[in-house]
Image: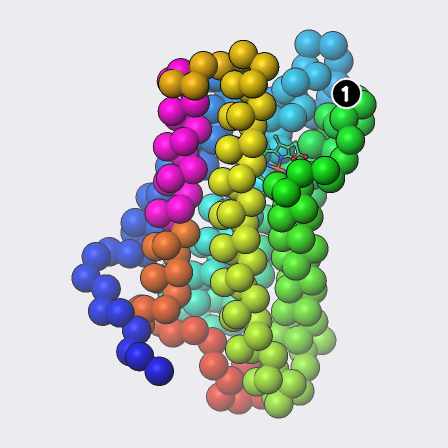
């Protein structure tokens, strides 16, 4: 196999910066352009409950998930600590994603909109199911109760593969969600094609694509640490 690319940019710092920018960007969009977020559904907050969805999905499955994927290379200290940060960040991401999914589901129920009729919703559901299964099998095998040494060694390459795959799926889902929301709003004349909001949403989508590329680059490049390998049964 070809060697990993030699990275001469501070890729870990850039990932953090772009992850923070993406989280701030979606929050700014929800608050500044879309009137903020709410978890209850009284008359004036009916639209605000939808806004919880993109904010929590993007912060959870993209920003936190990206940091979690790199924890083995960015967190100083013992391997056990790195692993704990990895699984705790993913757990928090899963928690945010469940609330985000609940919010959009409730929004659809309240407005009598069908569920799961778009490609975005199919991609999203697939992403959430894979993410939850990946977390559960990872926890069971690598943390508690922990699999046998050979079981962990054979799961690890698949765990790494699915981790990257789910992350790419989360980027694709978020980009398709931004596109869909923007087109919905343009077709109902809520915003113009070249309005600052539409351009802002396009830019956020582009930012997510760049962030995705950098996270994958950081994963494949030899970093300060290295991706988990199995050397002993106590790990
Ligand atoms: C990885 C992140 C995301 C996941 C896993 C996800 C998942 C989902 C799912 C499963 C639904 C279907 C809900 C239903 O049928 O009741 C949905 C709906 C929706 N999402 Fe997302 N979403 C994500 C990010 C985003 C983002 C960033 C936006 C940007 C605004 C967005 C916009 C929408 C919209 C407009 C709907 C309603 C229309 C539809 O069902 O496609 N989503 N999402």
Q: Residue at point 46% right, 53% down? A: 66
Instruction: Identify the secondary structure beneath mark 1.
Output: loop
Residue 33 at x, y percent in the picture: 48, 17
Residue 45 at x, y percent in the picture: 68, 15
Q: How is the image coloured?
A: rainbow
Q: Which residue is mark 1?
A: 111
Ligand 1 lies in quarter: top right
Q: Residue at point 51% right, 33% down? A: 179
Question: Quick check: 201 above or below 163?
Answer: above
Is residue 203 on the magenta stretch? yes
Per the rendered image, the range of residues in magenta is: 195-211
Q: Residue at point 37% right, 40% down? A: 207
Furthest residue toward top? 44
Whether residue 20 is visible here, answered yes or no, is no
In depth, the one of 194 and 142 nearer the eye is 194
Location of residue 55 by image quarter: top right
Question: Quick check: 193 above or below 232?
Answer: above
Label tally: 1
Say few, some or many: other residues with alpha carbon within 10 Å of mark 1 (under 14 / 14 to 19 / 20 or more).
few
Q: Residue at point 63% right, 69% down? A: 138
Quadrant (top left/top right/bottom left/bottom right) for the C terminus? bottom right
Location of residue 25 by image quarter: top left
In depth, the one of 149 and 41 nearer the eye is 41
- Does residue 133 appear to the left or right of 211 in the view shown? right
- Does residue 224 appear to the left or right of 193 in the view shown? left
Location of residue 185 by image quarter: top right
Q: Main secondary structure of the magenta part?
A: helix
Residue 37 at x, y percent in the picture: 60, 22
Whether residue 127 is visible here, answered yes or no, is yes
Furthest residue toward left? 8
Question: Quick check: 138 above or below 203?
Answer: below
């Amino acid at each position: 196999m070809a060697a990993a690319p030699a990275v001469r940019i501070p890729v870990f710092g850039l990932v953090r910066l772009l992850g923070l920018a993406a989280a701030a960007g979606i929050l700014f969009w929800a608050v500044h352009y879309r009137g903020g977020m709410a978890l209850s559904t009284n008359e004036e907050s009916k639209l605000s409950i939808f806004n919880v969805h993109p904010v929590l999905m993007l912060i959870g499955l993209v920003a936190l998930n990206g940091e979690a994927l790199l924890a083995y290379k960015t967190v100083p200290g013992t391997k056990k600590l790195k692993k704990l940060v990895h699984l705790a960040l993913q757990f928090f991401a899963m928690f945010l994603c469940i609330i985000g999914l609940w919010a959009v589901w409730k929004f659809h129920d309240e407005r009598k909109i069908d569920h799961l009729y778009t490609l975005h919703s199919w991609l999203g559901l697939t992403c959430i199911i894979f993410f939850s299964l990946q977390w559960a099998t990872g926890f069971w095998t690598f943390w508690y109760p922990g699999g046998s040494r050979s079981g962990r060694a054979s799961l690890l390459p698949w765990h790494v593969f699915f981790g990257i795959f789910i992350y790419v799926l989360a980027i694709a889902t978020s980009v398709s969600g931004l596109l869909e929301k923007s087109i919905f709003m343009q077709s109902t004349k809520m915003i113009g094609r070249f309005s600052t909001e539409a351009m802002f949403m396009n830019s956020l989508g582009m930012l997510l694509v760049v962030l995705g590329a950098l996270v994958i680059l950081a994963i494949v490049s030899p970093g300060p640490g290295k991706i988990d390998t199995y050397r002993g049964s106590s790990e």
